[in-house]
Amino acid sequence: MGLNLKKLLSISALFFCTWTVHAQQVYFVDGYHGGVYGHYPMWVTKFTVDHLIKHPEWRIGMEIEPETWDTVQVKDPEGYQLMQTWVNSNRVDFTNPTYAQPYLYNISGESIIRQFTYGFKKHRAHFPSITFSTYAVEEPCFTSCLPQLLNQFGFKYAVLKCPNTLWGGYTRAYGGELLNWIAPDGSSILTVPRYTSEAFEENSTWQTTAWNNSDRFIEQSRSQGIQNPIGMTYQDAGWDNGPWLGTGNRIKNNSIYTTWTEYFEKYAPKKSDDHWKLTQEDIQVNLMWGSQVLQQIAQQVRSAENALLRAEKIAAMSTLEKGFKIDQDSLSEAWRTLMMAQHHDSWIVPYNKLNPNQTWAQAIKDWTSYSTIKAEEFIQQALGAPVTSNVESNKNTAYVRVYNTLGHLRTEIVSVHLPSHWVGAEVIDEDGRSVPNEITASGSSSRLAFQAAVSAVGYSTYEIREVKKESKAKQHVTFDQEGNCLIDHDLYRIVLDKSRGGTIKSLKVKQLKNKEFANQSSAYSMNEISGHFYKENSFKSTKDSPATFKVLHDHSLSVQVAIYTEIAGHPVIQTITLNKGQKRIDFDLLIDWKGEVGIGEYAQKHKWTDNRRAYTDDRYKLKILFPTSIKQQEVYKNAPFDVLKSNLDSTYFGRWDDIKHNVILNWVDAYDPQSKLGLAVLTDHTSSYVHGPDLPLGLTIQYSGVGLWGMDYKITEALKMKYALIPHTKVWDESAISEESNTYNEPLYAFYADNLKLENKEFLTMEHNGFEISSIQESEDQVIVRFFNASSKKDKQAIKLHFPVQSITEVRLDGKELGAVPIQEKNGQSIMSLTIPRFGLKTITIKR
C-alpha cells in the first residue's frame, strides 16, 4: 500500500508539473491600429495577409477605421479580396468597430452609441459576416459606462490595456488575470485589466512593461500570481515590422501569439471572482486642456452634438404628427462628419496634417459646421411650409411655435425676430392668456422675447399681436456710491465689485432667505479669472484691475450686464445674464488677446518625452474661480451616462506618471452635505477643472506654450466661451443638475410663422423626473426612443404616449429584439411601464 501511495504521489507530481508547464505560458496580442485618416498606406493590407500566410503562428487584432476599406477596395482590390477571406479566421480579430476611434470619455453618451452603430454598419458593408466579441484599443478609448454599451452591442469581453500608446493617459493598474468590470448601472463584462503589477516602462512616457512582453513584465506578473500573463502592442498601420516579437523559434520569451478573443475563450479562466466597480477617475487621462485649439475643437463638437440630437427629436415629432420622413442618407452624412471630429487624433494631434492642405483642427471646423448646418436644415424640413424666413410681413398678427425636446416640462425665455416696424407686442397662449414679453432692436429687425411653457416632448403655440405702445420695464440694475453694479432679479441679488474687476462680491439666493453663496473672506473672488503668465513670472488676475459696466438689458424677463476689465493688459468682457424663473446664471466670456502670451507653470523647453510637463498643472493655467461659502465640499461630476463623486484630494499633478482625472464633460458640482448647499458649474465644452484644499473650484480656460510632441500651442485669436453657475440646495440628483445641464445643451426651439394653428401638443410624458430622453429617431415605419435613468432612485415609472400605438418592443443597442412591452390603453392614451436601474439605458421601438 505504501508503494502504491508512493507511485500515486509520483504520478500526481508528474501530472502537476506537466499542468504547471502548460499553464505557465506567456501570451501576446499583436495587431494594427489606424486608418485612412490616421495612417494606412495601401500596401498594408497585402503585407498583413502575406505575413499571416508565411507565419502560421502569428495572430493579429485589428483596430482599423471602417472607412479605410472604401479606399482599399478601390486602390488595392487584390488586398481587399484577400482580407475578405481572412476576416472571419480565428487568427484575425476585429476589436473596435467605432466609426472614428474616439476617446469616448470626452463626448456625449449618445455620440458613443452612434460611433458604434455607424461603425458596425460600415464594417458590415464590406464584411457582411464580421463578428465583434472583444473590445480592445491601442489608445485609452475608455469610459465608465462602456460595459453596459458593449453588452447591448453583443460584445462578450473587454480589455483595459493599451500598453504602447499612453500619451493621452492610461487606466489605473488594478487586479490580476481577469476581472468583472462593473458599470455604473450594475452591468458587467469579463475583462483583462492593466495588472496591478503592470508598471510603467522605464525612460518612457507612453508605455507600460506589457508592450513587448519584457522580462520585467513577466517576472512582475508571475510574482503577482498571474499564471498566464499577456502583453499587447497594436502597431500603427504602416509599420513594416510584421510579427512584433519575432517568428519561429526566435519569438521573444517563447511568447504565444493569440488574439484577444482566442485568449478569453481558449487560454484564460472562463470567469472571475474579482469585481471592479471602475469609476471615471480610474481612467487617468489628460489632453491639452486649456489650449486654444483643443478648446475650439471641443466647443465645435459639443455644438454639433446638441444640434443633431435636437434635430432628430423634432423630426421624430413631425413624423408622429404628420408622417414626415427625414432623409436618412443626409442624416448619416451629418453624423459621419461629427464622428470624424470626435476621432482621437483630432483631439491629441490637432496640428497634424490630415492632408497636404489641412490640419485636423481645420478639418474639424468644416466637419462640425456641416453637421450643425444640416441639423438646422432637418428641422426646417420637418416643420414644413408654415415656417417664414422673411419676417418683414405687413401683417400685424403672427405666431410662434416652441418645441421642447426634453422629457420634462420647461418654462424658459425664448426669442424670435419680428418685423422691424413692430414697437410692441402682445403674446397670447392657447388659453387666451397674455404672456409677459419684451421687444428689443436687433439689427434691421426687432427681437421678441417671452417666457414659454412647453410640455415634455411637445410644442406650444403662441399668437403674437402687434401693439403700437412699447411697455415700460421696471429697473433691476442699479449702482451704489462706489460704482458697484447691483442686480436684483427674481431669484438672485448679485453685487459686482467695480474695484476688483467686476468679480462677484455677493451672490444671494432669495428663495433661501437671501443665503450668501460668495465667500467674502477668501483670498480669491467669485468669477475671478486668474493664471500664471510665465514670461512675466507672476500670477495675474482680473481682480487686479477696476471694471466698468454696461447694462445691455434690464427687464423683468431678462437682465444682462457686460463687465469690462482686463488681465495683464488684455481686454476682458464678461456678460452675465439672468432670466426669469431660471436657476442657471449664464456667462459669456471674451478675452481679446494682444500679442504673444505664455500661460502655464513655466516655459517648457525640454524634450517632449520628459515626464515632467508644464501643461498639466491647472493651478497655473488661466482659470475662472468660484470660491463659495460652502464649507465641507464634496465634488460631483458627470461623464457619459454616469455621475460620480470624486475621490481626489486635489486635481493637481505635473507628471505623466501621476495623471489625475480632472475632466469636466458637462458639469462639476461642489456640495456640502452638512449645510446641503452646492454650486454647480456648467460649460459649453469638454475641458478640465481645478479643485483642492488651497484652491476653490475652478474652470480651466486657457494654456499657451509647448505641449504634446513639442508643438507650440499658441493663442492666435480671442478666447470665446460660455459657462453657467447654479446655486442649489440638496445633492446633485435631488437638485436636478443633470436636467439643468440638458436644458443648457438643448434649449427650446422657437420659430416665427405668419399662420399656425393655435394649439399645444405633447407626444410623451413621464410619471416623474429622473429619466432622460437620450434620443428619439424616426426609422422606416417606427419611432425609436432611448431612455436614460440619469438621477432617479425610482427605477420604474409609467410613460404615456399621446399618439396611436400598434406595438412597442424593447431592443438592444444593436437592434436585437428583447421582447414586447405591454401597453395599457386609458383615456385614448397608450401607457407603458419601464424599469431602468440608475444610470441604465433602455431602447424601445414604437410601431404606429
Image (cartoon, helix red, strand yellow):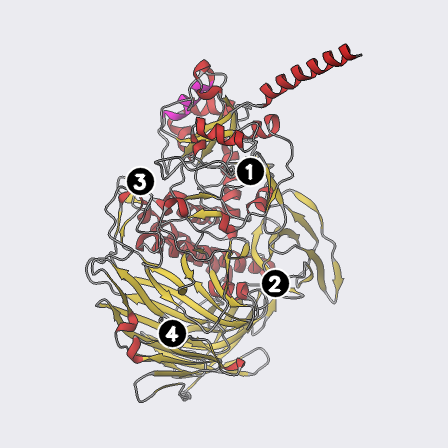
**The residue tagged with tag 1: helix, strand or loop?**
strand
- Give the residue at mark 2: 770
In this rendering, which labeled residue sits more in front, label 3 or label 1?
3
In this rendering, which labeled residue sits more in front, label 1 or label 2?
1
Q: Mark 3 vs mark 2: which is more N-terminal?
A: 3
Q: Mark 3 vs mark 1: which is more N-terminal?
A: 1
Disc number at residue 146? none
Q: How far across and down, in percent of the image, does residue 514 sit? A: 49, 82
In this rendering, which labeled residue sits more in front, label 3 or label 4?
3
- Give the residue at mark 3: 609
Q: Which residue corresponds to the image point at 58% horizontal and 57% vertical from the top-left?
A: 323
Say if mark 2 contacts mark 4, CB within 8 Å.
Answer: no
Residue type, numbered disc 1: Ala
- Give the residue at mark 1: 158
Say if mark 3 contacts mark 2, CB within 8 Å.
Answer: no
Residue type, numbered disc 2: Gly
For mark 4, does the 10 Å Cα neighbourhood hold few (<14), some (14 to 19), or many (20 or more) residues?
some
**Foreground residue among 582 and 671:** 671
Looking at the rendering, the stretch of residues picked out in magenta corresponds to 43-52
Q: Quadrant of residue 2?
A: top right
**The residue tagged with tag 2: helix, strand or loop?**
loop
- Give the residue at mark 4: 576
Say if mark 3 contacts mark 1, CB within 8 Å.
Answer: no
Q: Mark 3 to mark 1: distance in Å? A: 30 Å
